[in-house]
Image: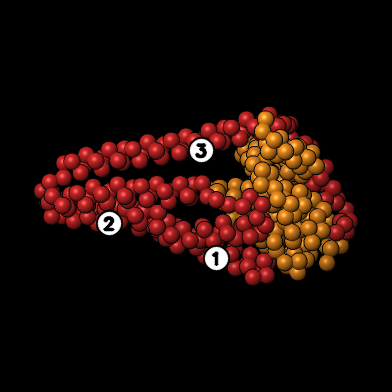
Amino acid sequence: MAAELPGPDPKSLWKDQEQEAESMTLERIHFLVRRYDGRVRFSIAAMAVILVLVGLLGGQAWIKAHDTVMRVWAILFVFGEVAVCVLAYRIVFPQRDPAEPAGAYLRRRLQIRLGYAEGRWLMVIAPLAPFMLLSVYVDLTRRPGPLGARLASLGVFVAALLIAGLRSRRRIPKLKAQITELDGLLGG
Amino acid sequence: MPKGRSEQDRRYLEAATDFGPALDRLARGYEADPDLRRDLRQEIHTELWRSLARFDRRCSLRTWVYRVAHNTAASHVLKQKGRRDLVGVEELDAVAADDDGPERTLIDRDARQRLLDMIQTLKPADRQLTLLYLEDLDAAAMAEVTGLSTGAIAVKIHRIKAALAARFNPGGDDGR
């Protein structure tokens, strides 16, 4: 596929670019990999600290619980947080083939983004839903004070979910168009 | 040093020697900002080194290197917040027509910068093909790197050549 374009040849223009000043030596690569691995270890350690705190809070709630509802509340809190951490870990550190064909890789990434734009991100916090519903029930039936104040936190949470959902949905048409085009190019 | 790691290092050095300059150009095609480009370049090389621990000869080293590099760069582009709207190679003319007023300075830049500007405007899939075309890969090699059908690649290359001709040789053959 030789260049057939007369005048300034884009391929020559492209290939004749000056080299980057910083050279990528093996030592540099090893340093960068160590730094990346250090960040991963830090993230895992941070997640472990969060889980320990969740365990402590859950344990304290269990000890203080004076009836079945509050004990269930403590259990749902711990299990919900652990599940959210596991899901978040799988999103932050996905298993993937680094040498997947570039078009297929791009399509998969766009499909994931489309899924999140369509509301799949709710799945990440879904394990906390039973805990949150029970929290609302506890707030409504046991907390003193006017009804408005008891519902305020729920209102803020629902409003935040709606805003986040509406913002992400704006990306849907563009993502769908890109995926459709890629499907045509991939011959699928 | 473990034997597996020295083999990985050897493969990386081979890849970096053969394709290092192409990877530098690829990073330029994906990122205009010098600092972000430096990060992207480091990320591409790091990903390449890590991936070579799993190099299974299912494809040539060249295909492997380009796949890893384009995948890393595509993730980089998709992660960018507030990026300008990217277009397909078919829509490049419309973008050029909008480049008046302050943006008119684009035309006064040197040809290489105009080429970079054009590439950085493209959607990831079109950018992949344009960069591979400029690196002189043939349609079969592009199909191996991208997984796209050779028919679709032929059509895209035709449009890429036309777009390049329109920008760098407006009065001449447009490659059609």
Residue A182 is drawn in which quadrant?
A: bottom right
Amino acid beneath label 3: Val
Q: Nearer the viewer, residue A183 or B110?
A: A183
User: What is the residue that sits farthest to the front in this orientation?
Assistant: B3
Chain appearing in orange on the rendered image? B
Front of the two marks 1 and 2? 2
Q: Are marks 2 and 3 on the same chain?
A: yes
- Please give left or right for residue A169 compared with residue A5 in the image: left
Residue drawn 16% across the image and 45% down it: A65
The colour applied to the residues of chain A in this rendering is red
Crowding near the residue tagged with mark 2, few <14, some 14–19, many ≥20 C-alpha atoms within 10 Å: some
**Residue A28 image point, x, y percent:** 67, 30
Residue A130 image label: 2
Q: Are marks 1 and 2 on the same chain?
A: yes
Amino acid beneath label 2: Pro
- Please give left or right for residue A66 compared with residue A130 in the image: left
Residue drawn 59% across the image and 50% down it: B75
User: Vertical placement of B33 versus A184: above or below?
Assistant: above
- Circle 2 chain: A
Q: Are marks 2 and 3 in contact (CB under 8 Å)?
A: no
Nearer-N-terminus badge (1/2): 2
Which secondary structure lies at badge 3? helix
Residue labelled with disc 1:
A176
- Circle 1 chain: A
